[in-house]
Image (cartoon, rainbow, N blue to C red):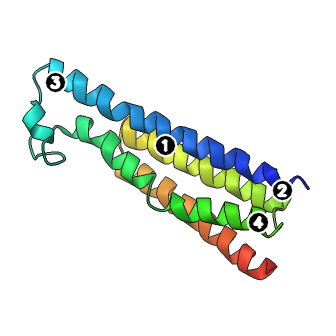
Amino acid sequence: MNQAAIFHPVCALALLTLLVLLQIPFRRFRAGFAKRVSYGDFRYGESQSVPGDVSLPNRNYMNLLEMPVLFYVLCLALYATAHVTPAMIWLAWAYVAFRVLHSIVHLTYNDVRHRGLAFAASNIVLTVMWVRFFLLL
């Protein structure tokens, strides 16, 4: 088993995070040019007057820096302990897929039910990965 294969889904999730990061200035500048926001609206983060479609990428970006930390740590631990298995790689890709789905829903039509399901599914997959890792030790 190629232990380094665990880093493919890690790189995919990092790429998603960077793509969402690019959405933040894109939407802010677009809103600024349309006079929907002013620079002062971002002086201390995001003020109440920032429209939802402008603040969503920032919230999604924060989501991608919260629970995924446990994913990144786990993937490094799997690699360091040589416990990367085909099942763990499959689960890692499933986790990334659910995070991609969550971001797509969040940044497009933002149905809370669909977004919540994708978020919950990703957390269940991550929990399964951690339990399997504990059992492998």
CA separation in Å, label 2 and label 4: 9 Å
- Comes first in the chain, label 1 or label 4: 1
Q: Is residue 29 left or right of residue 1?
A: left
CA separation in Å, label 1 and label 3: 23 Å
Q: Relative to residue 102, is residue 82 depicted above or below?
A: below
Does residue 121 appear anywhere in the picture? Answer: no
Which residue lies under the disc numbered 1?
17
| Circle on res. 131 | none
Which residue lies under the disc numbered 2?
3
Closer-to-camera residue (105/16): 16
- From the top left corner, tell me how far across and down residue 97 is, in percent: 61, 46
Q: Relative to residue 131, is residue 50 depicted above or below?
A: above
Instruction: Report the residue at 68% width, 68% height from top.
Output: 129
Instruction: Report the residue at 52% width, 61% height from top.
Output: 69
Q: Nearer the viewer, mark 3 or mark 4?
A: 4
Q: Specify few, some or many for label 1: CA neighbours under 10 Å numbering under 14, 14-19, or 20 or more.
A: many
The image quadrant that residue 131 belongs to is: bottom right
Q: Secondary structure at mark 1?
A: helix
Residue type at the position of mark 4: Ala
The image quadrant that residue 105 belongs to is: top left
Which residue lies under the disc numbered 3?
32
Closer-to-camera residue (115/86): 86
Does residue 37 appear anywhere in the picture? Answer: yes
Q: Nearer the viewer, mark 1 or mark 4?
A: 4
Q: Is residue 17 left or right of residue 133?
A: left
Q: Nearer the viewer, mark 3 or mark 2?
A: 2
